[in-house]
Image (tube, grey):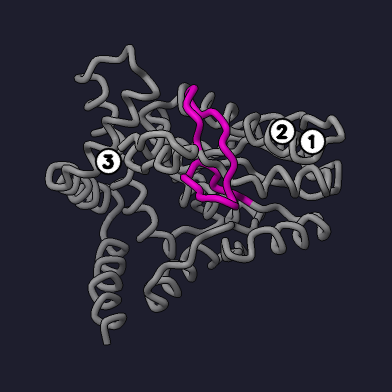
Amino acid sequence: MRHRLEYLPVWLLLRTIGALPRRLAWALCMSLAMLVYALHGKLRRVGMRNLAIAFPEMSEKDRKKILRTVYLGLGRQMAEFCRFPRYTKENVREIAVYEGFECLEEARKRGKGLLFLTGHFGGWEVGSFAHSLYGNPIKIVVRDLDNPLVDGMVKQYRTMHGNQTIDNREFLRGLLSSMREGETVGILMDTNMTPPQGVFADFFGVPAATAAGMARVALKTDAAVIPAYTVWDPAIHKYKICFEPALHLIRTGDTDADVLANTALFNKALEKIVRKYPDQWLWVHRRWKTRPEGEKGIY
């Protein structure tokens, strides 16, 4: 009964927003996002703390401006997610275009599978959805939502054009089998982890508990690791699905050392993207929550 009571308002909101004209859907969802910004002090404090860690030289005024822009972006993405059923192969260019697609094509030639190194940038849901509409469905590593009814609805939207999801509890096994089949898997690598899944690698100069599975699979299978992310471009009023050249993995023959070194390499690649688009990363996540033993908590 609790699951049904939670599901009904989510279903109603999704369908109502999805039926609105695009600009009106944006306005409504961006207003809701700013309401959350105003009322949810804990998330604001987390965001400001993270920005202070990453950009200590930045003024508090500029940090607040970035954080407000992040919330507006979350609202815009929420509106687009609700409208997913209205997008087709014919009109997908209205919401997203490619940048650097040749990097993806070059990496595909290796024929050993592709790993998208990505994070919670600008329009991560929009990027994977539009990518599938362009004829390039991928597998996405996700954490199933606690409510199975809501989870099923969200999964339906994510996969309506060929994408598939991999439960993060089946992370390594799912990745290995996908790479053997030469498939593409997208992994959000910018979330806090806990031992034993996570290893500490610097992110903005501060040790961050980071998933090590991607590095292990890449080293074992020789799959190409490509930084991939989706950002909102206000100049063209569309999302850009961006790809960068495949990363050159570090191989010394010491597996544990190589896993740690490549995980640090991945964090450095993500940090570079955050620095390029500081107002499009999800600052309200407690990225540095897990600390090395004996170290004081950051939050």
Question: Is 72 rendered above or below residue 5?
Answer: above
Kindly state the secondary structure of the residue where label 2 is placed.
helix
- Tag of residue 103: 2
Q: Nearer the viewer, residue 187 or 170?
A: 170
The amino acid type, in three-letter code, at marker 3 is: Tyr
Q: Residue at x 42, y 40 (%)?
A: 287
Tell which circle, 3 or 2, labels the residue nearer the N-terminal end. 3
| Residue carrying label 3 | 71
Q: Residues within 10 Å of mark 3 (few under 14, many from 20)?
A: many
- Tag of residue 106: 1
* Among the 4 quarters of the image, the one containing residue 177: bottom right
In-image side of 229 versus 223 (left or right): left
Question: The C terminus appears in which quarter of the rendering?
Answer: top left
Q: Position of residue 150 (x, y in %)?
A: 37, 73
Tell which circle, 3 or 1, labels the residue nearer the N-terminal end. 3
Say which of marks 3 and 2 sits in front.
3
Q: Residues within 10 Å of mark 1 (few under 14, many from 20)?
A: few
The amino acid type, in three-letter code, at marker 1 is: Glu
Magenta region: which residues? 186-208
Mark 1 in CB contact with mark 2 (< 8 angstroms): yes
Q: Reply yes or no: does residue 258 show up in magenta.
A: no
